[in-house]
Image (spheres, grey):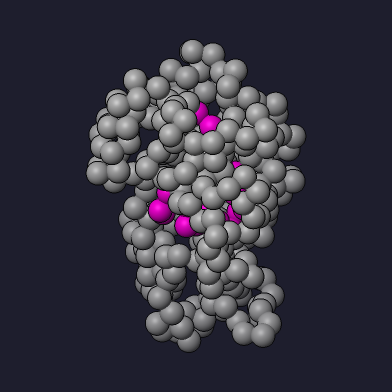
Amino acid sequence: MAFNAAASSCRRNDILTPAPSTRDKEQLMEEIKKLYKKIDKNWLVVFPFPDVHNMLGCVMPCAREILQSPSNYQNFKKETPRVAQFIEWLVISNQSYLELVPKQLNVDYLKTPHQFLFVSDTPQKQAEFDGLVSRNGGRTRYLFHGSRMENWHSIIRTGLKNMSGTKYMLVGAAYGNGIYLSNHLATSYGYCSRFHSGNISQNCINNNCCLSKSLKEGGMALLAVVEVVDTPEAYQYNQGQIVVVKEDKWCSIRMLVAYTGHVPDVDLNNMDGQSRRKIQEVTQMYKTGDILERARH
């Protein structure tokens, strides 16, 4: 979904990083045409030049369906080998780890059922962050980060970066250069745009799976819950709601959360101790190797 949003953006030449190879473009286009025909969808040409990956987005196979069994995937790969190759690239190129948080571990304070564990830091980056936390008395705080839907393809793969003053900056830097966060959900939500049904495969819409219902009913905004070392050296606090982190070494994404419909009133500065411990429990999940054991945890 994040890739589809980036591929369909007018800024795709700048923000689609990493980008897939365009080798065998003609053969891939022929396979995409087959997928359009299979779901009885009109063949679209994006003016002035057809972008093969943008066109692939709406006819991507449903992951749940093709991964139901090894034979399902092998049959799909035999029928459309270049599309399968692209899907494999999409998975392999993502160095981050995401997992749906088990219902019993949901952080109720965040007021959404769509919660995901997120791990993107390398061991070296995590060790540096842990060292900064230790040197500052173990104090950290949690803040939201919101971004436009087309930026998440890159954020999910590389984590948060200071893009101020670069061609990737879109909304300016009114409070100085850095990574913009907020304790107020509504403030960070203001930097978001919503994923919609055009960002998900028509196959998922037809099967009514993979968040398609939420996307059809007004869209979905994605935000990050970020842990920040709590020291004046790390950030600048502006207007009681905008936090600008100077360097990415001071912060780390711990969760992704999605909101549909009305955005609730959530202020992480007022979060109770139990909710904070729940976030910490979620961030410990990835240290347990077995999926079933994580679910029990």
Q: Quadrant of residue 236?
A: top right
Quarter of the picture holding the C terminus:
top left
Up-down: is 7 above or below 243?
below
Q: Kindly identify the residue that appears in the image at 40 percent across and 53 percent down.
A: 158
Q: Position of residue 111 (x, y in %)?
A: 62, 26
Left or right of 10? Residue 279 is left
Tally of marks? 0
Taking depth in this image into account, of 27 and 240 the one nearest to the observer is 240
Residue 37 x/y as whole percent = 61, 75
Q: Could you tell whether 120 is left or right of 25 in the image?
A: left
Magenta residue span? 142-159
Residue 214 placed where, x, y %?
67, 43
Q: Based on the picture, tell me whether residue 146 belongs to the magenta stretch.
A: yes
Q: Quadrant of residue 21?
A: bottom left
Q: Quadrant of residue 285?
A: top left
**Residue 118 visible to the viewer:** yes
Residue at 43 percent across and 17 percent down: it is 277
Viewport quadrant of the N terminus: bottom right
Q: Does residue 56 sit above or below 286 in this rendering?
A: below
Q: Quick check: 238 above or below 216?
A: above
Instruction: Mark yes or no: residue 213 visible.
Output: no
